[in-house]
Structure formats: C-alpha cells, structure tokens
Amino acid sequence: MNKQLTQLLAIIMLSSLLLTACSKQAEDETKVTEVLLQGKTMGTTYHVKVVATEKAVKEKQLQAQIDDLLKNINQQMSTYIPDSELSRFNAQQSTEPVEISDELREVIAESLRIGELSGGKLDITVGPLVNLWGFGPEYRPEKVPSDKQLIETKARTGLDKLVLEGNLLSKKIPELYVDLSTTAKGYGVDKVAELVEKNGFNNYLVEIGGEMRLKGFKHTGELWHVAIEKPVNGERAIYQIIVPKDNAVATSGDYRNYFEENGQRFSHIIDPDTGKPINHKLVSVTVIHPSSMTADGLSTTLMVMGPEKGLAFAQAHNIAALFIVKTEHGFVQENTVKFVQYLK
Ligand code: ADP
Ligand code: MG
C-alpha cells in the first residue's frame, strides 16, 4: 500500500535451500517445476510460485489474471491512488453513509473485528497520526511533533468514528481518514491464492510485500519452508525456519522502517492509545493463520501490544505467534503453544 512496504518485503525470505537430489528425476519426468510469476503492486512487489508446467500456467494466462485482480484491489483500497474507492471515501466531507463494494467491506469489517478484539490497538483510522510522524503518503518530516499537534491529530482518529453497517460506511467526523495498510496486502494475498486455486493449481506460494500464503508442496514434493530473517538492520541471516503447511504467514517488524532522533528510534507503527510510535523491545512478530488478511492484521496488532501484552493476548486468543524480543543478551524467541507445530 505504501512505499515503506517495499522495505518490509525482505522480512521473510523463501527457503529453497532444501532441495533433495532424488526429486530431480521426478521433475524431469513430469516437467513440473515451480513457475514464478512476479510484478509490482501496492507500492511493493509480489511473487507467486505455482507448481505446474510452464505450459499450463501460460494457457491459463495466470500472470495477466493476477495483474488484473491486483489492479482492481488497488483501485479499491489504496490511499496512494487519489480516485480509489477508499480515497474517495476519505476525501468526502459528508458524514452520510455511502455504499461500498463487497471487497472493501470485507477488509474494513475484518480490520474492525481485530480492532475491537484488541481493544483498539489495531486502528485503521490512525492515518493522520502516521502522517504526522512522517510515515504516510504525505511528506516525511523526520521530526518529533509537538504535544499540541499530537493532541489535535489524535482527536481526528478513533474506531468509534467509523461505522459499518452491511455495505454502508459512514464517518462521524468529516476529516476521518481510513488507512488499510495493515490488512489490504494480506487480503490481496488471499484473493490471489483463491484465483490460483480456481485455475486448478493446488500447490503454490503467494507473496505480496512479505505477506504470504502457501498450499501443498514444492515441486520436489517437500512442504514449503519459510525462513524468518534475523532482525538486524543491514544484515540478512536466517533466524528460524518454519513449516506453515496450508496457511498464511505474516510478519510485522519495526527494524526496517523507522527514523531516529537523538538516538531514539521511531517506528511506523502507532500505538493508538498514546498517538505515538511504539517504543518497546519487540523487534518482530510472525503470525500463522489460514487467512492472510487476518494474519496480517494480527501481526501488526501484536506488534503494537509489545512483548508481554502481545504474548499474553496471543495465548489467550489461541493465535499461532512467534515473537523475537531484543534483550541485553541478544535476541530471545518466544512463541505461543499454537505456534510449536510450525517450528522446524
Ligand atoms: P508491518 O509489516 O510492520 O506490520 P504494515 O505495513 O503491515 O507493517 O503496517 C504498518 C502500517 O500500518 C503503517 O505504515 C501505517 O500506515 C499503519 N499503521 C500504523 N499503526 C497502526 C495501527 N495501530 N493500526 C492500524 N494501522 C496502523
Ligand atoms: Mg502488518
């Protein structure tokens, strides 16, 4: 959805290190490979790996279908496209309900559900605060705002100011601004995954800007592996390998997107209660869930909550989550009971 997302792409990288020699033969016989389709969307990149023959993928014109689908989603949900459905809602000054598309409704409804579940920690109306701190579509001041600015801006946010009833969406104040950066990428992943399946492919990996969803097996017959990167700036090392099976994987991490002032780091994730960027020792959260949209939203939610509250919340709600926390003694990994099954 935004330019910063590009930098987050590398949070997770695919592990294709584990190919075995014996599968090579099978591959030659059937000529099934991992066909890679890729492109740009939502201010970032996408990659789709389909286990099939090149011929089958071409015949279905899968690349064109994916590009069309993503273009449509962007035209609905991007805050970077001035005439997108969401941008038009944001720009409108009226507080009268407007009828929105089913797609936009689905993403807003899920975002509001997680928002409510988390006591407002996931808040799709924080846009003005994101911009104030310099991480949104507006310019990037790289400067700490004043208390006055903070109070004024915070007054323009809040989930209580957005009402969704069926497909009718309304705002309680004209200047309310909805930002779906935390769930729209995941939604895109889900829709691409459904499209790939509709075309008859049942072994695939779909990834947009680091959010991914997998199904079935690689062309080698192995399960898909995902490597979680070591959370250090300027370094690319594998931290933990996971086997998510037929699920989505989302990682939220603040270590690639921040600015510094007087030695303090300011993340692009805002705690809606303080109106300020999060400031704690949690460096990344990975969530596994059947829905990429839900995983995407939950990973950001847990990131906002921080190491203790996030872990307690994930345990209480039976969320498969892995936390990487920075301590004096280096990085410490913590995970919920539900995540154990995915650890390699
Ligand atoms: P991450 O991969 O770190 O989770 P995302 O791109 O998914 O990052 O989400 C971060 C973006 O979400 C920010 O750039 C901002 O636009 C928006 N955002 C920041 N704080 C919140 C919040 N508390 N609730 C919802 N959206 C937020
Ligand atoms: Mg996220």
Image (spheres, rainbow, N blue to C red):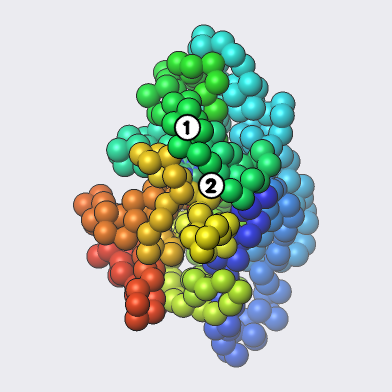
Residue at image point 60% right, 45% down: 134
Q: Label 2: how many residues lie within 10 Å, few (<14), some (14-19) or many (20+)?
A: some
Q: Name the quadrant containing residue 132.
A: top right
Q: Position of residue 80 (x, y in %)?
A: 69, 37
Question: What residue occupies the far bottom of the structure in this picture?
Answer: 21
Q: Do labels 2 and 1 touch, CB within 8 Å?
A: no
Q: In this view, does 338 lie above or below 125?
A: below
The residue beneath circle 2 is: 144
Q: What amino acid does circle 1 point to?
A: Lys
Instruction: Judge the density around disc 1: few (<14), some (14-19), many (≥20) Cα neighbours within 10 Å.
Output: few
Which element type, helix, strand or loop, lies under badge 1? helix
The image position of residue 291, as x and y in percent, is 45, 49
When the figure is inspected, residue 310 is found, relative to residue 67, above or below; the finding is: below
Q: Residue at x 72, y 26 (%)?
A: 83
- Residue 4, numbered label: none
Kindly identify the amino acid type of the residue bearing the numbered disc 2: Val
Compared across the picture, whether 240 is left or right of 100 comes to left
Front residue (pair 116, 39): 116
Residue at 44% in and 76% down:
240
- Between 196 and 120, the one lying in front of the other is 120
Determine whether, in the image, residue 76 is placed left or right of residue 330.
Answer: right
The x and y percentages for residue 285 are 41, 61
Q: In which quarter of the image is residue 180?
A: top right
Look at the numbered disc 2 and give the secondary structure of its residue.
Answer: loop
Q: Is mark 2 within 8 Å of ligand 1?
A: no
Residue 192 appears in view:
no
161 w.r.t. 144: above or below: above
Residue 332 in sight here: yes
Q: Where is residue 88 in the image (x, y as percent from the top left)?
A: 65, 22
Q: Which residue lies at the image location 34% right of the left edge and 81% below the top edge?
A: 329
**In which quadrant of the rendered image does the N terminus lie?**
top right
Which residue was labeled with disc 1? 148
